[in-house]
Amino acid sequence: MKKGDLDELKDSIKKLGLLQPIVVMERTKLRSGQKPYELVIGSRRVQACKELGNKEIAAIVIGEQDEERMLAVSLAENMFRAPLSHKDTAAAVTKLYKLYGNDEDKVAKATGMWPQTVLRYVYLKEYGTPKMVDWVQHRKVSLLDVKRMLEAAQYLFSGLSGQHSRPSAGSLLFLSFGSFRERGIFRNPSC
């Protein structure tokens, strides 16, 4: 699991609480040292809650299952859960962004996403082409890559009209070689 994914889950739990309980199996025949419950679904939620310092977590308790059944349930949860596509997430985030007066901080606070992630989804929805959405969905490029492509295009096109706006940090720019100080890197004049 990616650290950023867990951090976003923790932020969401802090702001909204645990929205989906974990699932545990009750053990009726305990061996020495065995705990009465075994986690079946929700390991990320458990990890996030532990890191937040929670002492308890909401859980649905199912009766004892044979090993195959328990494995099947766990596998189904992890393989067949269908998170929102990037396209659907971008649409929902953008709608919320507009409802909150174009304030990414309010959307971040409401959803547990980071403000940068909110803006990347808004860029994807508002300015991305279907091809860009497909690239993100199939992990060919990241949301940040799409945002940078769109900012670069906006910067270049605004230059054609003479209306350059200051780019944000992390933006991809195309600069003429005389417009920056060189520090010994990329001094090859044939570049």
Image: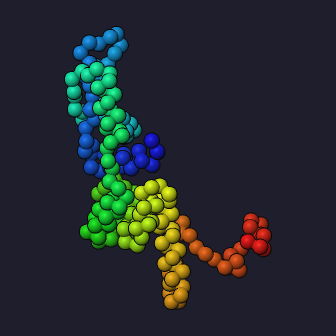
Query: x%, y% of residue 26?
Result: 24, 22
Q: How many marks?
A: 0
Q: Identify the residue shown where x is 68% and y is 75%.
A: 180
Query: x%, y% of residue 111?
Result: 31, 55
Query: x%, y% of residue 118?
Result: 38, 62
Q: Quadrant of the C terminus?
A: bottom right
Q: Residue furthest bottom?
A: 161
Query: Would you identify the image quadrant in which residue 32 lies?
Result: top left
Query: Would you identify the image quadrant in which residue 57 lies?
Result: top left
In this orientation, which residue lies closer to the viewer: 64 or 33?
64
Residue 84 is left or right of residue 131, and the answer is left
Residue 115 shows in this picture: no
Residue 115 is left or right of residue 25, and the answer is right
| Image colouring | rainbow
Say above or below: 62 vs 114. above
Query: x%, y% of residue 79?
Result: 36, 40
Residue 17 shows in this picture: yes
Q: Identify the residue shown where x is 41% and y is 63%.
A: 133
